[in-house]
Image (cartoon, helix red, strand yellow):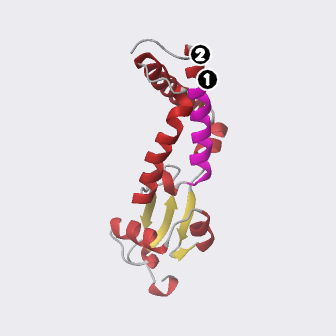
Amino acid sequence: MFSMSVPWWEFVLRGVIVYAFLLVFLRITGKRNVGQYDPFDLILLLILSNAVQNSMNAGDNSLIGGLISATTLIICHTLLAQATYRSPRLSRLIDGKPICLIANGKVNQQSMSAELITGDDLKAALHAAGCLHTYEVEQATIETNGQITIVMRNRDSANKDDGV
């Protein structure tokens, strides 16, 4: 239980490599995967965590090895959070930037496609914000955390001819 089959520093090195790989992989897959989990997204994350387990522990099932791996991941996460807080440039690189999906009631199909947001995903976000039609929306933005933020138009200025 306490005897490790590999040296402690190998757990740390493996943990840092796996953390960096998953960070890049999840960043490349887009914001949608971060904020809106469909069942297949959740399954992917669960399988992914199981797939990288052996690469982190080198087949070692000791308690100490698991604690070293977990501590390494927590430290990596904390250091990255502090670094992105201090550096707006690094934050944009890691987190990305918000992307406008609807402007003045008009849907930006190019942004929708780039972020893999379906019409049904957008409708669900609109309904959650209490709106039924895109012409009621001043702006809809997918934030860096994957959430879709809806800013409603002034009800008097919303014109049905502007949107879908």
Magenta range: 14-30
Residue at screen point 46% across, 55% down: 41
Q: Residues at badges 2 and 1 in contact (C-beta under 8 Å)?
A: yes
Q: Is residue 17 above or below residue 65?
A: below
Mark sitting on residue 32: none
Q: Which residue is mark 2?
A: 9
* Residue 164, horizontal then vertical, whole percent: 48, 83
Apparent side of residue 105 relative to residue 154 in the rendered image (left or right): right
Question: Callout 1, which amino acid?
Answer: Leu
Secondary structure under tag 2 reads: helix
Res 47 visible: yes
Number of disc labels: 2
Tell me how far mark 2 sits from mark 1, CA to CA.
6 Å
Q: Within 10 angstroms of label 1, few (less than 14), some, or many (20 or more) residues?
A: some
Apparent side of residue 76 relative to residue 150 in the rendered image (left or right): right
Q: Residue furthest top?
A: 3
Residue at screen point 42% across, 55% down: 37
Mark sitting on residue 13: 1
* Residue 136, horizontal then vertical, whole percent: 42, 75
* Residue 159, horizontal then vertical, whole percent: 45, 83
Q: Is residue 155 magenta?
A: no
Residue at screen point 51% across, 61% down: 141
Question: Callout 2, which amino acid?
Answer: Trp
Looking at the image, which is closer to me, 64 or 33?
64
